[in-house]
Image (tube, rainbow, N blue to C red):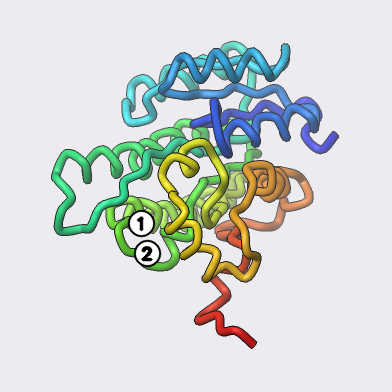
């Protein structure tokens, strides 16, 4: 029970990677609070998670709502040991075609909203003298992938925010890391990626398949556990070798 008696908050926790993290943490003994902007998905997720999980509807781009939600965690649970900031929205569009409102929405959720949640969690953890924060980044924040301009820029910001928070919070006993998946077989990706897109990804992935949400959750579980207590400011690619590979030629 790696997370026995720990309290974890997970944004974007009603589906995909966030939900898999919630399941993994519960199995390891944590109490889990999941946040999601979609109330129907939230209720469906909570119905599967059991008595040690609760949840609330939350728009992470609303600073006041984020502050109130994290204040409630301390009121109800008494502490907060772990944050996984997983909430995100996609956008596949060439940079010169992105409209201002589309750009702003991606930045507001994927970067600014992640900052709001990390800041709120960090304030609680500083008072405790201990905590683990994991940002859900992406290979899009490490390498340029055409058509993902706003998304990639937001995730690149997540990478630097991870380093900055690690540098500033290490003395308070808080570690801050990020996980950078390549495509993961989530409901969102299954809608976005057709056969042609999948074939292109399989051509550049040394492991010729997409990750499962549980594989990303396993990496996240490691980073929030005591086994990773001396790891901070690090990005862990969970990408089937994508960030390590160049041109993959037939031998």
Work out which residue is located at the far bottom of the displayed protein and give it. 251
The picture places residue 235, in percent across and down from the top left corner, at: 56, 59
- Local packing at callout 1 (Cα closer than 10 Å; few below 14, some 14-19, many 20+) is many
Quadrant into which the C terminus falls:
bottom right
Residue 17: name its quadrant. top right
Q: Nearer the viewer, residue 192 or 181?
A: 192
Residue at which label 2 appears: 145
Seen at 68% across and 18% down, the residue is: 48
Seen at 48% across and 51% down, the residue is: 137
Mark 1 and mark 2 residues within 8 Å of each other at the beta carbon: yes
Residue 207: name its quadrant. bottom right
Seen at 43% across and 20% down, the residue is: 38
The picture places residue 195, in percent across and down from the top left corner, at: 47, 54
The picture places residue 46, in percent across and down from the top left corner, at: 61, 16
Q: Is residue 29 above or below residue 241?
A: above
Count of number-bearing discs: 2
Q: Is residue 139 left or right of residue 231?
A: left
Q: Secondary structure at mark 2?
A: loop
Quadrant into which the N terminus falls:
top right
Q: Is residue 230 left or right of residue 190?
A: right
Q: Secondary structure at mark 1?
A: helix
Q: Nearer the viewer, residue 129 or 208?
A: 208
Work out which residue is located at the far front of the displayed protein and give it. 195
The picture places residue 177, in percent across and down from the top left corner, at: 57, 52
Seen at 45% across and 15% down, the residue is: 39
Residue 152: assigned label: 1
Q: Nearer the viewer, residue 133 or 104?
A: 104
- Local packing at callout 2 (Cα closer than 10 Å; few below 14, some 14-19, many 20+) is few
Residue 19: assigned label: none
The earlier-in-sequence mark between 1 and 2 is: 2
Q: How far apart are the alpha carbons under marks 1 and 2?
A: 8 Å
Q: Is residue 61 left or right of residue 231?
A: left
């Amino acid at each position: 029970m790696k997370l026995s008696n720990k309290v974890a908050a997970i944004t974007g926790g009603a589906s995909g990677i966030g939900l898999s993290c919630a399941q993994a943490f519960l199995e390891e003994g944590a109490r889990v609070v999941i946040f999601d902007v979609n109330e129907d998905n939230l209720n469906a997720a909570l119905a599967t998670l059991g008595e040690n999980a609760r949840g609330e509807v939350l728009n992470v781009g609303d600073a006041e709502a984020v502050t109130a939600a994290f204040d409630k965690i301390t009121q109800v649970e008494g502490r907060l040991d772990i944050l996984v900031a997983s909430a995100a929205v996609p956008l596949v569009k060439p940079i010169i075609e992105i409209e201002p409102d589309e750009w702003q929405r991606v930045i507001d959720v994927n970067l600014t909203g992640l900052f709001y949640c990390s800041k709120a969690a960090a304030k609680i953890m500083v008072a405790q003298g201990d905590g683990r924060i994991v940002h859900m980044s992406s290979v899009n924040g490490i390498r340029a992938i055409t058509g993902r301009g706003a998304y990639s820029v937001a995730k690149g910001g997540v990478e630097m925010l991870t380093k900055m928070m690690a540098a500033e919070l290490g003395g308070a006993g808080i570690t801050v890391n990020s996980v950078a998946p390549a495509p993961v077989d989530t409901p969102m990706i299954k809608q976005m990626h057709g056969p042609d897109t999948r074939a292109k990804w399989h051509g550049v992935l040394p492991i010729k398949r997409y990750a499962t949400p549980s594989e990303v959750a396993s990496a996240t579980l490691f980073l929030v556990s005591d086994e990773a207590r001396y790891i901070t400011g690090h990005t862990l690619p969970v990408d089937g070798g994508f960030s390590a590979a160049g041109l993959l030629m037939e031998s």
